[in-house]
Structure formats: structure tokens, C-alpha cells
Image (spheres, grey):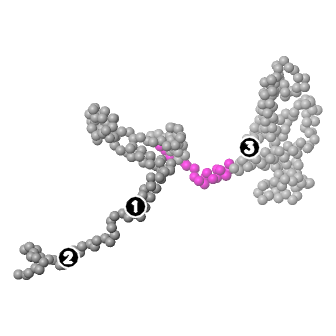
Amino acid sequence: MTSNLGGSLPEGDEDDYMSMAIAEPSPIFSSTETSIQRSARKKREAEARAHQPSKAELARQAELKRDKALNASLPTTSKGFQMMAKLGFKAGSALGKEGNEYARKEPLGVVVKEGRSGVGMEGEKKRKFREEVGVESGDESMNKKRETEVEFRDRQGREREEKRIEGLCWGAMKVLEGFEGEDGGSREDQLQAEGETEKGTSKPTKLVNVLWRELVRDRQEKERERRMRHDLHQSLSRDAAYNDPDEDKQDRQAWGDEEEEVEEEDPELEEFTALDPAEKLKRMIEYLRQRWSYCFWCKFQYPDEELHGCPGLTEDEHG
């Protein structure tokens, strides 16, 4: 029988030194908050209370709060739920006839519209998107042939080239008109000799060379519109019984005292304007070289008919 100096142990209880648990040492520092820690904590709390959220933060908080409310199920405390409950509605069940698999178990969701566009703007965007991707609306959709990137660039290049050549055509018309104006007006003298034109009247556009007739017609149209706008303002203060002996024919037409001559149709001009711009420019350049020894690309009138020194007829030959 072993003796125990510290007192007798109960029977069956012996010290197990292999599983001795060592107690944790007591903390050196006190668990109470110091004055420095308290000051720092109060400073952080004061900064948090003084912080004013920005508009973006307020909008974000409002959006989160709204989404949370919209995604939540219909609460039993709401007036709508209580009214439906009196009619036999139970939470989790559907409205209407029993056994209807398409019956809704939740109210219609609210779709919040953001932005300032109209109500039908989204539908218009979808329609345009379907047209762009080539999908027809309806039950049977069909993919249309879409324009590739290479085809789009080629088309844009052709359109730009046509506009450039069209501008060159108008420039060639002005050059032709300038040269023909220096010709002494032989056609005008011939018409006056034949009695086809009257003194003080302008040359009919049909008698102008078709190569630059479009330029003359366009200028006459603009001048006619300008005079009509001017005379319209002047007519507001004009007496109908007043007769001005100095008025010319165009003034009388503008005042309405004389009927304006209607420009007759010009099939020759219509046929010329229907040509490709490159073909029209080619004819103008050839006329300038043959009649006036002038190169449209060199911008120079050569002294000889052969145009010695000119690189060629086309724009590419001039570099």
C-alpha cells in the first residue's frame, strides 16, 4: 500500500503524469482598455459618424435596398397578402384553379427602368439590332447575308471615290466655262443674227455646251430661288396698283405680274448627267485638251496642240 503525502486518493484514481495538462500563463497586460486605446476608438467612431456618403454611395445603397425588397417574397403582414388570404390563398400555392401548372406562385416582378429614354426605346433598339444582324422578326426567323468587313470597306472606298470624281467634274465644268467665256461669244452673235434671242435676255441653257450645261442650270436655279426669297419679303409692303417703268422681265415675273417661263425638259442634259462620273470627267478632259490645249491635271495651257511635256491623259500618269 502506497502512502500519499498530500492526502489519500480515491480508490481507482491515480496520477497520470504522461497526460499532465500545463495551465496557460496569465496575461502580463491587463484586459482593460487603456486611455490610448480608448482615445483611438473614439476617434474612429467620430470619423465614422462624421463621414458623409457621396451621391454614388447613396445611389448604390438605395439600389441594394430596392433590389433586396423586390427579391423578397410577399410578406404575410402586407395588405395584399391578407386580402388574398381571406379568399383562400396560402403561402407557396398558386392563384386560380387548382392543377394549373402555368399559374403564378409569385407576383409579377418589377423591372426598374433606368435612364431618360422613352418607354418604346428598348423595343426600337431591339428591332434595329435584328435588322443589323439580319434576323427577321416573327415565328420563322431567317439569317440574311451579312456584309463582311472587307465588303464594307470596299463599298465605303467606292463611295468616297465617286464623291471625289464628282467634285472634279464640277471643277472641270468651271474651267470649261471660263475658257468658253473668253471665246468672244460667237454663239451669241449667231443667235442674234438668226433672231432667236432678244436683246437683254440671257442665253437659253439648251444652247450651252452639254459638258458644263449642268453648272449653268444649277447657277440659274440658285439665282431664281434667291430672287424669289428677296421679292417675297419686298412684296409685303408693295402696293398692287403701283407700276414701276424700270422693272425688267424677271422683276415682273417675281411680282406675279407676268408668268414665268417654265424651263423645258432637256433630254440631252439628262442623258449626260446619267453617265458615270468617271466617264463625264474623261469627256471634259478630252475636250479641254483638244479645244484649248489645256491639261486639267497639270493645270497648264500648253502652247502647242500636242501638249509636249504633259505626262499623259489620266490622273495616274501624273503621279
Judged by depth in the image, the label closer to the viewer, 1 or 2, is: 1
Amino acid on which the number 1 mark rests in the picture: Arg
Query: What residue is shown at x 91% (from left), y 31% (from top)?
Result: 200
- The residue that disc 1 covers is 38
- Answer whether residue 285 is magenta in the image: no
Name the mark on residue 275: 3
- The residue that disc 2 covers is 20
How far apart in space, not on screen, are marks 1 and 3 (Cα)? Answer: 92 Å
Q: Say whether residue 153 is visible.
A: yes
Q: Position of residue 44 (x, y in %)?
A: 44, 58
Q: Which secondary structure lies at badge 2?
A: loop
Name the mark on residue 54: none
Judged by depth in the image, the label closer to the viewer, 2 or 3, is: 2
- Answer whether residue 144 is magenta in the image: yes
Amino acid on which the number 2 mark rests in the picture: Met
Mark 1 Cα shell of 10 Å, populated few (<14), some (14-19), many (≥20): few
Residues at circles 1 and 3 in contact by the CB criterion of under 8 Å? no
Nearer to me, 209 or 301: 301
